[in-house]
Image (spheres, rainbow, N blue to C red):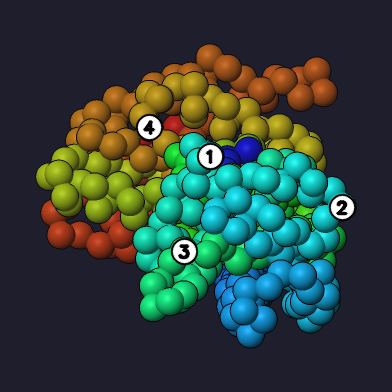
């Protein structure tokens, strides 16, 4: 394979590889863009959903304020008689189903609970004396307003809850005195919207952390199994007693069609590249074959079929090139025209096969007698053209005599008979500024003189 075609095929292979990489890279960029677009949409949706969840949590926590205020109003209306507490509490809890428990704490000690079942341990609990619970109670007492604490673990069952406390003051005989607390205990399980469960069922990861002013550690109110925070949306939920943290996580987006798109792209780009590469290789092979045939035809068109030396066309091309070289470099150039003596008689007496043998033998002898730089051409019939580059007429005469001497020593044997060969030779040296036609005309005239002068003659 020619060097040019090898380079072309290598360039084609590199181009095909580059095309594959560009195509795969482009499709991968589209997939990434689509995934990022889907992720942005999902994050926006989660932000909106988180905002709704926060509003629902805030609304349910605000029910604690309503419950404590309602209990206070009922106490005041009954002159702080708690005999009907169970009836009030039942109605209030049914109306505000976000609440799990309501309590009264006369003088800071829990005295009434609804519902009582499961909360018996809280009865008699002194909120102002408990080191772990007193801070929130004292804060409520000092502010005189509803105060929220938690989420914290209840002493009666260990569940997380938010506790709303309202300090109650009673005026008797013009003296304002502390009566106790109205309390609403809001279970975290009931505060959490049902929407959170539905999101979890859809494959999202949810985590909710509370904010307990009485503790350095943030309590985990809810966390999905296998929660991943690397790809998540975080937001704050403002509650009366602080800031809760909501986190909505999701798995990295991987559309099921992305894999198919990648496989299709790789196969498609490979097939197209292979097709282009094979086609280019075939074209290169065809071009090489055509070049080889053209070179072969060119050689054949410049070669004499009988003697296997250059023909007239090749001789004229070589002469033109050497004339140009002689002009450019101011060098000598001599031209010799060689013609076999009595060649027609040989053909007539022995036949054309004998003549062909003499011609082939003469071509061999001419090439053997001259230098490697000298050129020999058969320009027609029994006529040969010889070029002597860098040689003046004296050097050409010496070469011509060598040719004649070689022919004398090397007779032709045909059909068991030796046939002697002699020649007439005309010589001309190139003159500066002379054309090829002029030079050929002069050497042809010298050949004619040699033939007119007799056999085995050289004229110059």
Q: Are marks 1 and 4 in contact (CB under 8 Å)?
A: no
Residue 203 image offset from top left, x and y in percent: 79, 57
Q: Are marks 1 and 3 in contact (CB under 8 Å)?
A: no
Could you tell which of marks 3 and 4 lies nearer the N-terminus?
Answer: 3
The quarter holding residue 140 reads bottom left
Could you tell which of marks 1 and 4 lies nearer the N-terminus?
Answer: 1
The quarter holding residue 287 reads bottom right
Residue 248 image offset from top left, x and y in percent: 64, 59
Looking at the rendered image, the disc whose residue lies closer to the viewer, 2 or 3, is 3
Question: How far separated are the C-alphas under marks 2 and 3?
Answer: 28 Å
In the structure shown, which secondary structural element does the residue marked by tag 2 occupy? loop
Question: How far separated are the C-alphas under marks 1 and 3?
Answer: 18 Å
- Residue that badge 1 annotates: 130
Question: How far separated are the C-alphas under marks 3 and 4?
Answer: 136 Å
Visible residue check, residue 235: no
Question: How far separated are the C-alphas under marks 1 and 4?
Answer: 126 Å
Question: How far separated are the C-alphas under marks 2 and 4?
Answer: 128 Å
Q: Are marks 2 and 1 in contact (CB under 8 Å)?
A: no
* Residue 447 shown left or right of residue 49 in the figure: left
Number of residue marks: 4
Identify which residue, 130 or 24, lies in the foreground.
Answer: 130
């Amino acid at each position: 394979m020619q060097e040019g075609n090898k380079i072309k095929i290598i360039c084609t292979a590199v181009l095909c590889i580059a095309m594959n990489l560009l195509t795969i890279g482009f499709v991968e960029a589209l997939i990434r863009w689509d995934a990022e677009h889907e992720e942005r949409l999902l994050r926006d949706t989660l932000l909106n959903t988180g905002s709704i969840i926060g509003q629902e949590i805030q609304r349910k926590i605000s029910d604690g304020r309503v419950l404590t205020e309602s209990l206070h109003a009922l106490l005041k209306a009954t002159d702080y008689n708690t005999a009907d507490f169970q009836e009030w509490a039942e109605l209030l809890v049914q109306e505000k189903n976000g609440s799990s428990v309501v309590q009264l704490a006369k003088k800071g000690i829990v005295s009434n609970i609804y519902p009582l079942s499961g909360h018996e341990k809280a009865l008699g609990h002194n909120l102002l004396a408990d080191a772990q619970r007193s801070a929130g109670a004292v804060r409520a007492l000092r502010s005189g307003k509803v105060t929220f604490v938690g989420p914290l673990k209840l002493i009666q069952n260990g569940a997380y809850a938010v506790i709303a406390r309202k300090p109650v003051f009673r005026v008797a005989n013009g003296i304002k005195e502390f009566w106790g607390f109205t309390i609403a205990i809001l279970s975290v399980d009931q505060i959490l919207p049902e929407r959170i469960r539905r999101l979890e069922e859809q494959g999202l990861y949810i985590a909710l952390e509370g904010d307990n002013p009485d503790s350095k550690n943030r309590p985990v109110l809810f966390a999905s199994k296998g929660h991943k925070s690397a790809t998540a949306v975080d937001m704050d939920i403002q509650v009366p007693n602080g800031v809760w943290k909501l986190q909505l996580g999701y798995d990295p987006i991987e559309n099921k069609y992305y894999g198919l798109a990648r496989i299709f792209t790789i196969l498609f780009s490979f097939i197209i590249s292979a097709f282009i590469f094979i086609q280019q290789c075939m074209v290169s092979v065809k071009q090489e074959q055509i070049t080889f045939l053209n070179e072969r035809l060119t050689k054949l068109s410049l070669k004499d079929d009988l003697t296997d030396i250059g023909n007239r066309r090749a001789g004229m091309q070589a002469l033109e090139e050497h004339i140009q070289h002689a002009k450019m470099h101011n060098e000598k150039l001599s031209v010799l025209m060689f013609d076999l003596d009595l060649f027609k008689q040989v053909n007539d007496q022995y036949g054309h096969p004998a003549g062909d043998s003499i011609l082939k033998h003469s071509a061999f002898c001419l090439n053997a007698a001259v230098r490697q730089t000298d050129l020999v051409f058969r320009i027609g019939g029994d006529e040969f053209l010889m070029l002597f580059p860098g040689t003046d007429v004296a050097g050409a005469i010496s070469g011509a005599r060598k040719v004649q001497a070689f022919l004398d020593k090397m007779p032709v044997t045909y059909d068991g008979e030796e046939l002697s060969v002699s020649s007439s030779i005309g010589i001309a040296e190139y003159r500066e500024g002379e054309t090829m036609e002029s030079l050929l005309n002069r050497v042809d005239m010298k050949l004619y003189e040699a033939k007119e002068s007799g056999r085995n003659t050289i004229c110059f």
